[in-house]
């Protein structure tokens, strides 16, 4: 989806603010949220792709104001309600101290293969050195194809194994593993006359994002 | 966002957004514990691991060993997790794959995740706030030299800058070049100049003396 999360290349965010000697967590709740997300994903209640899609659906204003772990918190709430683990309004009720009947028990996690790497019977479509163009796409769902490379031409730098395809795994259409390619783009291909000299971008793109150039 | 705030032990009672995050996170945890989805002591363990056990020091040890031992360097580049295991730094089975990018006097690597904030956390700990912030994520792909200069690293024009956008389940860390003036240094002293920023690629190690 073309959300605010897809930040690559945007102007207007100002300088990078570096905090000296920052703590691992700035408040206790941040660590609690991280732990809950790790467990909800680790136990298989939700996938990491569903979780990332939940962050992307937070909305532009909330995305920029909730903070990093605030976005995690908002996504976890959303996707656990959608998953049936929590009833709509249940967190509000708990915060306000109002009793609310729990939802019926959610379906237990499905057994999935460990990790993200998968083996495909078919060979990879592109080889190292292949000239590729990134397909122009604007899906409303989750994708790992950033806008700033859409439609651009690059060269395959590395052929990686097949991995779970986030675009389908995020919304219940399953893993549908796809080969992953590291593609190199020369900076002028991405930024035109405004590109910095002697620089390039490498990015990992799934096979369905690419076509021969 | 919150980089102007005082960071104390309170959950930002004066900041309505932080207060809302804290209250809702607490409600969420109590509900998930009741439902058997999470366990508070397991969350305690995850938090403690990131606060105490996993951090950039892991990367510094790997880099320092790679600088003094060419055979280890080759193993580190070929299989970073196996190399980490050799040094006793890998915990638990199965890891998100890591690719090590070797910077040199002619090529400088720098890592970002424009879509979220992917980072080799299982090895190097959690990323700094600036790495997760919209300014870094939006700008470093478009104007890496300007961003690096602002962060204190002025790269000569003859050095090629390669920006790596971590857009899938592969994580990247930089193996920086060993700085001049460190001949004869112990591995421990070498590790002391390998900061988190040098492992991301927004800084280069410098032979600053102890």
Image: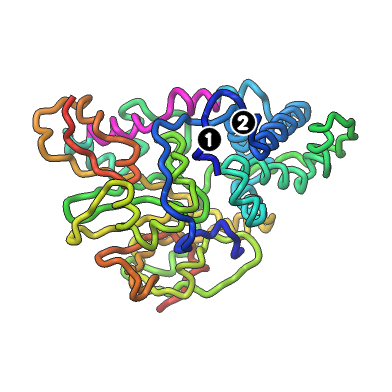
Q: Quadrant of residue A18?
A: top left
Disc assigned to residue B12: 2
Image vertical order of residue A173 relative to residue B87, above or below: below
Specify whether residue A23 is in view: yes
Number of on-image labels: 2
Image vertical order of residue B71 relative to residue A174, above or below: above
Give residue A147's position: percent from left, percent from top.
Answer: 51, 67
Question: If you read the primary sequence from the N terminus, does the residue marked by circle 1 or circle 2 appear first?
Answer: 1
Q: CA distance from mark 1 to mark 2?
A: 9 Å
Residue under circle 1?
Answer: B5
Give residue B3's position: percent from left, percent from top.
Answer: 50, 40
Image vertical order of residue A195 relative to residue A35, above or below: below
Secondary structure of residue under mark 2: loop
Q: Quadrant of residue B57?
A: top left
Taking the view exactly as shown, the residue that stands out farthest to the top is B41
Display colour scheme: rainbow
Q: Output the chain of dot 2.
A: B
Q: Give yes or no for residue B177 being in the magenta stretch.
A: no
Magenta segment boundaries in residue numbering: B46-65
Q: Quadrant of the C terminus of chain B?
A: top left
Mark 2 is surrounded, within 10 Å at the Cα level, by few (under 14), some (14 to 19) or many (20 or more) other residues, namely some
Q: Is residue A129 left or right of residue A168?
A: left
Contact between marks 1 and 2 (CB within 8 A): the answer is yes
Q: Output the chain of dot 1.
A: B
Question: Which residue is at the front of the view, A204 or A164?
Answer: A204
Specify whether residue A174 is in view: no
Mark 1 is surrounded, within 10 Å at the Cα level, by few (under 14), some (14 to 19) or many (20 or more) other residues, namely few
Q: At 86% from the left edge and 35% from the top edge, which residue is drawn?
A: A102
Q: Quadrant of residue B146?
A: bottom left
């Amino acid at each position: 989806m073309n959300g605010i999360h897809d930040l690559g290349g945007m102007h207007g965010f100002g300088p990078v603010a570096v905090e000296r000697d920052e703590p691992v967590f700035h408040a206790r709740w941040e660590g609690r949220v991280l732990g809950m997300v790790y467990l909800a994903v680790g136990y298989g209640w939700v996938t990491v792709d569903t979780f990332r899609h939940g962050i992307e659906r937070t909305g532009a204003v909330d995305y920029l104001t909730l903070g990093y772990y605030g976005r995690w918190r908002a996504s976890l709430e959303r996707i656990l309600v959608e998953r049936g683990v929590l009833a709509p309004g249940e967190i509000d009720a708990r915060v306000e101290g109002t009793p609310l009947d729990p939802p019926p028990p959610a379906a237990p996690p499905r057994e999935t293969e460990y990790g993200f790497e998968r083996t495909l019977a078919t060979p990879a479509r592109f080889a190292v050195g292949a000239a590729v163009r990134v397909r122009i796409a604007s899906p409303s769902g989750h994708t790992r194809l950033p806008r700033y490379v859409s439609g651009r031409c690059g060269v395959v730098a590395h052929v990686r194994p097949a991995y779970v395809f986030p675009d389908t795994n995020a919304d219940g259409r399953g893993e549908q593993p796809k080969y992953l390619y590291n593609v190199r783009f020369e900076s002028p291909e991405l930024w035109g006359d405004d590109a910095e000299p002697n620089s390039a971008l490498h990015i990992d793109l799934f096979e369905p994002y690419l076509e021969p150039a | 966002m919150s980089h102007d705030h005082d960071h104390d032990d309170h959950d930002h009672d004066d900041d309505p957004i932080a207060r809302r995050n804290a209250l809702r996170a607490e409600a969420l945890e109590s509900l998930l514990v009741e439902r058997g989805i999470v366990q508070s002591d397991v969350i305690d363990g995850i938090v403690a691991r990131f606060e105490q056990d996993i951090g950039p020091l892991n990367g510094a040890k790997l880099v320092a060993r790679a600088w003094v031992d060419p055979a280890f360097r080759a193993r580190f580049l070929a299989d970073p997790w196996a190399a980490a295991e050799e040094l006793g730094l890998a915990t638990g089975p199965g890891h998100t794959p890591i690719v090590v990018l070797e910077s040199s006097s002619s090529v400088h690597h720098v890592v970002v995740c424009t879509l979220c904030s992917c980072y080799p956390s299982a090895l190097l700990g959690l990323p700094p706030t600036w790495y997760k912030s919209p300014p870094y994520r939006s700008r470093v792909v478009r104007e890496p030299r300007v961003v690096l200069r602002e962060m204190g690293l002025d790269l000569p024009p003859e050095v090629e800058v390669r920006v790596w956008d971590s857009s899938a389940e592969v994580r990247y860390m930089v193996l920086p070049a060993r700085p001049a003036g460190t001949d004869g240094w112990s591995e421990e002293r070498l590790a002391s100049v390998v900061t988190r920023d040098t492992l991301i690629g927004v800084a280069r190690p410098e032979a600053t003396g102890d």
